[in-house]
Image (spheres, rainbow, N blue to C red):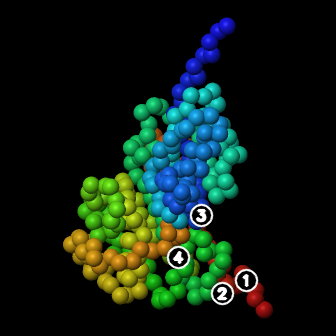
Amino acid sequence: MLAAQPQPTQRIALVIQYLGTRFHGWQRQPNQRTVQEEIETALRSVLNRPVVIHAAGRTDTGVHAAAQVAHFDAETLIPAHRWADVLNSRLPDDILIRASASVNSTWHARFSAMWRRYRYTLFTDARPNLFVTPYAWHYYYEPLDETLIQKALDPMVGRHHLAAFHRAGSSRPHSWVDVQSAECQRQGAFLYIEVQASGFLYGMMRLLVGLLVQVGRGERSPDDFTQLWTAERREEVKYAAPSQGLCLLRVGYPDSPFSPDVWFDSQPKLVLPDLTDPEYCLS
């Protein structure tokens, strides 16, 4: 009787979307529902053994992802491109694998990445909207000036020590960050703040947005904002923006195993109609 032939080991990369609302973040934790645990459970049901999945970044509780990237190793004959369908049939409805692909054994979702990009969405209409609430911070207290916020963001581009936006509890030994772009745009009632960097500090984006709101409402000038983080006045950064407005938008690699339509801009921007437009005939 011939012995069973060993199956080849493949490294599979995934592009993953998830709604962070009901998750205690990405990373597996005891007695908590996490994205990593759900995917690893699905993998185990297919491969009949424990599998560890490695992500490009660890999102916090309540934070969404439009194109998180992760990888795992498996001894299997299942074609790499089939893993998206295989896992989607076993995952809950708040996780979706957009695509899967084969990568070489040295490729790593975290260490091969050149940058990550996050988007924070604020909804500034006076009235709440149920269909917006899960994906944006409904900020209606004072008007927010996007030009002031952009002026505050401009000096952040470059390599800086951003300890002012580094939450306690991180295992990272330093606070140096290479910020590649930082943008604020308004589309009607929605304000979008996007930051792209080589990596992000624990809690950085939510602390950053919390302080930028002070700039946008005129409580703090762009110059004072810059002086605060350059002087590392961490004690003045007291408020983190709510998690539901934050989304890991995409991750960049030198040679991405995925086509741009899979990962580039897969979180649709929220848009409300301009009811003063003649197109809308209200009577």
- Identified by mark 1, the residue type is Tyr
Mark 3 to mark 1 CA distance (whole Å): 37 Å
Mark 2 and 3 residues: CB-CB less than 8 Å, in contact?
no
What residue sits 21% from the left and 72% below the top?
A: 231
Residue 173: tell me if it is visible. Answer: yes
Q: Is residue 180 left or right of residue 233?
A: right
- Identified by mark 4, the residue type is Trp
In this figure, which residue is indicated by the disc labeled 3? 22
- Residue at far top of view: 1
- Identified by mark 2, the residue type is Thr
In this figure, which residue is indicated by the disc labeled 1? 280
- Residue at far front of view: 31
Secondary structure found at label 3 = helix
Q: Residues within 10 Å of mark 2 (few under 14, many from 20)?
A: few
Sequence-first disc among 3 and 4 = 3
Mark 4 to mark 1 CA distance (whole Å): 27 Å
Secondary structure found at label 4 = strand
Mark 2 to mark 3 CA distance (whole Å): 37 Å
Sequence-first disc among 2 and 3 = 3
Q: Position of residue 94 (x, y in %)?
A: 64, 58
Mark 1 to mark 2 CA distance (whole Å): 7 Å
User: Between tags 2 and 4, which lies in front?
Assistant: 4
Mark 3 to mark 4 CA distance (whole Å): 17 Å
Secondary structure found at label 2 = loop
Give residue 137's mark: 4
Give residue 276's mark: 2
Q: Position of residue 208 (x, y in %)?
A: 38, 71
Mark 1 and 2 residues: CB-CB less than 8 Å, in contact?
yes
Image quadrant containing the C terminus: bottom right
Sequence-first disc among 2 and 4 = 4
- Identified by mark 3, the residue type is Arg
